[in-house]
Image: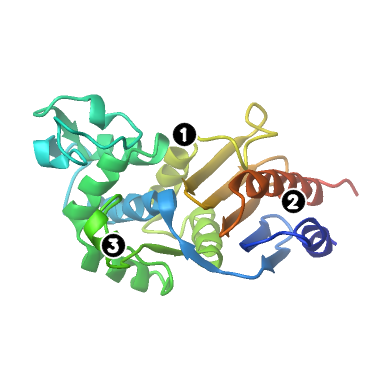
């Protein structure tokens, strides 16, 4: 039923789209769309959050490990900064931050500078090794955000909708890094402040742990909706009208909510 409803809603959609739904009580799931792997955009923040908790679990770092904001951290430079969204671009060079500050800012307000610091701190190779260890072979990080040199050379970050659905499912079950880490990561993702897609109809009704990604010509949102009967929903669209895609995703969220919370 839900499969047919989602198919009907995207029937005339122009562009790439992928939707993965899991009812966490019944186990019912479905994948709909014409694409699984997308340019990652802001969803990369989930991956560095994972890596941060892996480092903490392994004793390589602590939540209160210190980091001093440097001029080279600003995108562009402090005198000629590129607009990045977030908080760190407004803080002065020399500001003392903790590892926890960085991963919370990266996820809650999608702070691109915080993500880039974490990406450099952990390293591309180690991050992708962690993804391999977790069984996620299609999701890959290869560059910092707004790294124009790599972008011009066609080097991109990628995310698989199917793998992200599995990631959230395993977090929900307490199986990513550790039970404690899974719980804390979901709590942090519950503080994400971009609420125009999955939480649109429910922002004041339910706890929602999710991460968005919005860029030119692409949009995505993925996470867990803790309604009366919780469910996972991971969605992305590319090469499409983003306003139309946003409207489609809101409608699909409502369809999935009604399916998971139907009476009888």
Q: Label 2, label 1: how many angstroms apart (C-alpha)?
A: 22 Å
Q: Could you tell me which residue is drawn at 30 percent across and 60 percent down?
A: 151
Residue 247 at what x, y percent from top left? 69, 43
* Location of mark 3 (residue): 152
Checking the image for residue 191, the label placed there is 1
Residue 248 at what x, y percent from top left? 71, 49
Residue 19 at what x, y percent from top left? 64, 60
Q: In which quarter of the image is the N terminus?
A: bottom right
**111 or 20, nearer to the observer:** 111
Q: Earlier in the sequence, mark 2 or mark 1?
A: 1
* Location of mark 2 (residue): 256
Q: Which of marks 3 and 1 is nearer the N terminus?
A: 3
Residue 59 visible at all: no
Q: Could you tell me which residue is drawn at 66 percent across and 55 percent down?
A: 24
Query: Is disc 1 placed on a helix, strand or loop?
Result: loop
**249 or 184, nearer to the observer:** 249
């Amino acid at each position: 039923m839900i499969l047919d409803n989602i198919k009907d809603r995207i029937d005339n959609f122009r562009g790439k789209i992928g939707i993965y739904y899991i009812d966490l009580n019944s186990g019912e799931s479905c994948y709909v769309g014409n694409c699984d792997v997308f340019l990652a955009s802001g969803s990369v923040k989930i991956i560095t959050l994972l890596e941060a908790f892996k480092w903490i679990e392994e004793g390589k770092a602590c939540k209160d490990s210190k980091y001093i904001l440097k001029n080279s951290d600003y995108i562009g430079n402090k005198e000629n900064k590129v607009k990045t969204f977030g908080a760190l671009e407004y803080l002065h060079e020399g500001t003392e931050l903790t590892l926890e500050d960085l991963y919370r800012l990266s996820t809650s307000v999608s702070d691109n500078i915080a993500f880039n610091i974490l990406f450099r701190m952990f390293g591309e190779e180690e991050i992708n090794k962690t993804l391999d260890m977790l069984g996620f072979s299609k999701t890959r990080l290869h560059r910092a955000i707004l790294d124009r040199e790599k972008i011009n050379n066609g080097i991109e970050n990628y995310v698989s909708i199917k793998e992200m659905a599995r990631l959230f499912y395993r977090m929900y079950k307490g199986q990513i890094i550790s039970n404690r880490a899974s719980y804390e990561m979901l709590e942090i993702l519950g503080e994400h402040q971009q609420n125009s897609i999955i939480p649109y109809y429910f922002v004041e009704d339910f706890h929602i742990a999710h991460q968005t990604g919005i860029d030119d010509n692409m949009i995505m949102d993925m996470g867990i909706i803790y309604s009366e009967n919780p469910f996972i929903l991971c969605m992305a669209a590319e090469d499409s009208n983003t306003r139309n895609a946003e409207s489609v995703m809101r409608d699909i969220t409502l369809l999935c909510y009604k399916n998971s919370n139907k009476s009888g």
